[in-house]
Image (cartoon, helix red, strand yellow):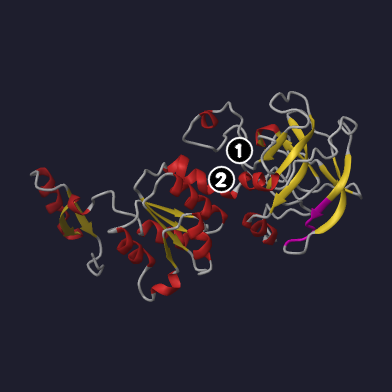
């Protein structure tokens, strides 16, 4: 797909633009293609002509929410996209008109302690509170044809031909990159890659288990392969994911439904001689997080710390053991009926 410059001319700079957008009027209902008005960018803002965008599970999850502070409608969803800078507001030096950019939902001010740290990507100057407007002044840049404001989503709102994004939410990219591939880097794929490569820093020869082989999970698979992992276990309830998983680098595939009464953690420990060195939960499920935790190799040896056990009425014995240097840790059980092991 070629990167067309579209209609990014100085004729529209500083003026509202009428364009098409897919607007969600009510939670869970089909999006409506309608004309909207996109305001010109204010200070530290960039107006982007969206070239293409993709649908993420997060869009669908928030589309379904019909109550609470984030259930604001009408709304323009979308947060994985690539586009061309149409015009810029004051104080913008990072990009210029015609640049190819990725809008991203996490801010990077480049100034706060966390943005400067290689250990964090959560900006503390512009906190990611998922507000339905702009990050600095909380205002809106979209209106419908009746003049009513339309809520933003994740500070991106890419299901529109034009959008306005704060400069802290923009990454300039090489214009030679195919745009349909580039838009995948705004969220899911880089989430998985970054978890393996940047956060965990998986070493060569490691064993890795990845729970969920969607876009995030496959990104993690690809990064694990690039890092030289010796065994990459893909876990997914959909058996059809095995084929695509192996294309990305999965060496072993487990469908939890095929494990019978055996826990998934037991199956993984059998494959890895005691547990995977790294486990990545790429679904967003508390239950699966527990499975992932139980599937990792023991790095901490805790059993040997427990040298004595007593009941509550014998607590003074625990004092004696410690004072006499006989104990590392004495576990004091409150209820005699508890199954200690």
* Residue 287 can be seen in this image: yes
Question: From the viewer's perspective, is residue 197 above or below residue 97?
Answer: below
**Quadrant into which the C terminus falls:** bottom left
Determine if the magenta segment contains residue 26.
Answer: yes
Q: Secondary structure at mark 1?
A: loop
Check residue 30 in the rendering and tell me which mark sits there, or answer none: none
Residue 126 placement (x, y as % from top left): 62, 35
Residue 64 in magenta stretch: no
Q: Quadrant of residue 202?
A: top left
Residue 212 appears in the picture as rendered: no
Which one is nearer the viewer's eye here, 195 or 152?
Answer: 195
**Looking at the image, is mark 1 or mark 2 nearer the viewer?**
2
Q: Mark 1 Cα within 10 Å, few/some/many (few <14, many 20+)?
A: few
Q: Position of residue 121 (x, y in %)?
A: 53, 37
Look at mark 1 in the image and give the residue it sits on: 127
What is the residue that sits farthest to the bottom in this orientation?
A: 260
Residue 50 in the image, given as x and y percentages of width and height: 76, 44
Q: Label 2 crowding class (10 Å Cα cut-off): few <14, some 14-19, many 20+? A: some
Q: Residue at x 68, y 62 (%)?
A: 64
Identify the residue position indicated by label 2 in the image. Answer: 190
Start-end of magenta stretch: 21-27
Tell me what residue is drawn at x 33 percent, y 62 percent: 271
Q: CA distance from mark 1 to mark 2?
A: 20 Å
The secondary element bearing badge 2 is classed as helix
Q: Please tell me which of labels 1 and 2 falls first in the chain.
A: 1
Q: Residue 278 vs residue 308: left or right?
A: right
Q: Nearer the viewer, residue 327 or 45?
A: 45
């Amino acid at each position: 797909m070629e990167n067309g410059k579209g209609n990014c001319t100085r004729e529209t700079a500083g003026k509202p633009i009428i364009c098409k957008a897919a607007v969600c009027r009510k939670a869970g209902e089909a999006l409506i293609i309608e004309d909207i008005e996109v305001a010109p960018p204010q200070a530290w803002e960039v107006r982007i002509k969206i070239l293409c965008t993709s649908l993420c599970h997060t869009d669908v999850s928030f589309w379904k929410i019909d109550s609470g502070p984030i259930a604001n409608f009408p709304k323009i969803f979308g947060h994985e996209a690539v586009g061309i800078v149409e015009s810029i507001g004051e104080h913008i030096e990072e990009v210029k008109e015609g640049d190819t950019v990725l809008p991203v939902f996490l801010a990077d001010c480049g100034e706060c302690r966390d943005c400067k740290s290689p250990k964090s990507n959560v900006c503390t100057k512009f906190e990611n509170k998922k507000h339905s407007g702009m990050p600095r002044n909380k205002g809106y840049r979209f209106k419908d044809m009746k003049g009513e404001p339309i809520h933003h989503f994740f500070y991106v709102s890419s299901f529109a031909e034009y959008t306005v994004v704060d400069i802290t939410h923009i990454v300039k990219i090489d214009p030679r990159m195919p745009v349909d591939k580039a838009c995948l880097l705004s969220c899911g794929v880089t989430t998985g890659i970054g978890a393996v490569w940047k956060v965990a820093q998986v070493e060569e020869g490691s064993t890795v288990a990845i729970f969920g082989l969607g876009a995030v999970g496959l990104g993690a698979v690809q990064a694990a392969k690039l890092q030289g992992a010796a065994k990459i276990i893909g876990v997914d309830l959909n058996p059809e994911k095995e084929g695509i998983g192996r294309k990305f680098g999965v060496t072993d595939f487990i469908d939890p439904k095929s494990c019978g009464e055996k826990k998934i953690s037991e199956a993984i420990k059998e494959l890895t001689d005691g547990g995977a060195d790294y486990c990545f939960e790429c679904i967003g499920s508390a239950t699966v997080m527990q499975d992932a935790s139980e599937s990792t190799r023991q790095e901490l040896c805790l059993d040997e710390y427990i040298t004595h056990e007593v009941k509550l009425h014998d607590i003074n014995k625990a004092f004696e053991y410690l004072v006499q240097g006989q104990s590392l840790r004495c576990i004091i059980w409150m209820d005699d009926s508890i199954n200690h092991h």
